[in-house]
Amino acid sequence: MEILHYTFFQHALIGSLLTAIACGMVGTYVVTRRLVFISGGITHASFGGLGLGFYLGTNPIGMAMLFSVLSAFGVEWVSKTQNVREDSAIAGVWSLGMALGVIFIFLTPGYAPNLSAFLFGNILTIALTDILWIGVLAFCLVLFFSLFLREIMFVAFDRDFAHTQGLPVRTVEYVMMFFIAVTIVLSIRLVGIMLLMSLLTLPQITMNTFTSDFRKIVWGSIAIGFLGCVAGLFCSYLFNIPSGAFIILVLVVLFLLAKAIKAVHLRLKIEGRR
């Protein structure tokens, strides 16, 4: 337990909590709206921004955020106004982002940048600046969900019905796409580009095993996400392996455990009726 006295580990725990809050809220909307592959497309599109940032010698995270936000708005706009299927737009953004990232990184002068922290994640390297940014994001998400939870739930479950109720569906959709893009970029340090989509879905589907209540899924996803992050951090420290892989592995185990508990509960309930 002496590792808890290290500043870098304390930063990692704080970053894990704030990331779990952001991903828990955004991920519940993503899963409910069935936007999982959009989040995957945005995640991989951010790789193009990372490559451009390295090539220009600027902050790669800032460029990745720009790419992610533009990709999110682009997919939303193309699929809603240009008569292009959503999955086709996602595939285009996904492949374009990865291709641009590879090209820019190859053209970057000097030594090739270390991409492992961005591809596979290592929250043990998180800085105080990263914590401040993810803290601002978590605060904005909590504020937005507190003020507009009804509108978010209506749009997430049935956007057509939300239209009939006179709700600002398009505004909510674009604001949530913005939050999805920013959450993805600021969470790259935690699990990396290759695994980030799982952090936005596994805690949510684990909670969905026991409840369909939107609010309970949000809170449960935050708790499960933070638990997975903490367990992954300790395993990462002990085995000296990037934390992202361990975090996702823990979340998968929790999901399988939840499914097993649910199956046993149903079996006991059926036997009790007999």
Image (cartoon, helix red, strand yellow):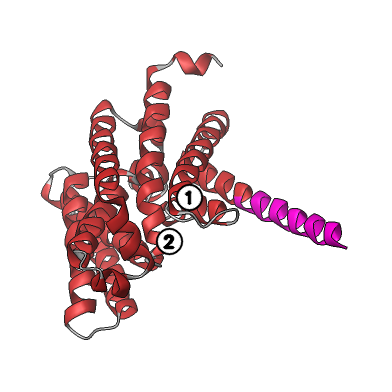
Residue 53 percent across, percent down from the top left: 17, 50
Q: Quadrant of the N terminus?
A: top right
Question: Is disc 1 placed on a helix, strand or loop?
Answer: helix
Residue 12 percent across, percent down from the top left: 40, 29
Identify the residue shown where x is 21% and y is 78%.
Answer: 80
Identify the residue shown where x is 37% and y is 57%.
Answer: 29
**The one of 45 and 88 positioned closer to us in this rendering:** 88
Residue 106 seen in the figure: no
Q: Is residue 127 above or below residue 197?
A: above
Q: Tell me the residue that label 1 is attached to.
A: 217
Identify the residue shown where x is 18% and y is 64%.
Answer: 168
Q: Tell me the residue that label 2 is attached to.
A: 31
User: How far apart are labels 2 and 1 at the CA level?
Assistant: 10 Å
Residue 31 percent across, percent down from the top left: 43, 61
**The one of 161 and 202 positioned closer to us in this rendering:** 161
Q: Is residue 88 above or below residue 249?
A: below
Residue 228 percent across, percent down from the top left: 53, 40
Q: What stretch is highlighted in magenta?
A: 255-274
Q: In this view, does 238 lie above or below 182?
A: above
Q: Which amino acid does label 1 sit on?
A: Ile
Question: Is disc 2 placed on a helix, strand or loop?
Answer: helix
Quarter holding residue 137: top left
Residue 78 seen in the figure: yes
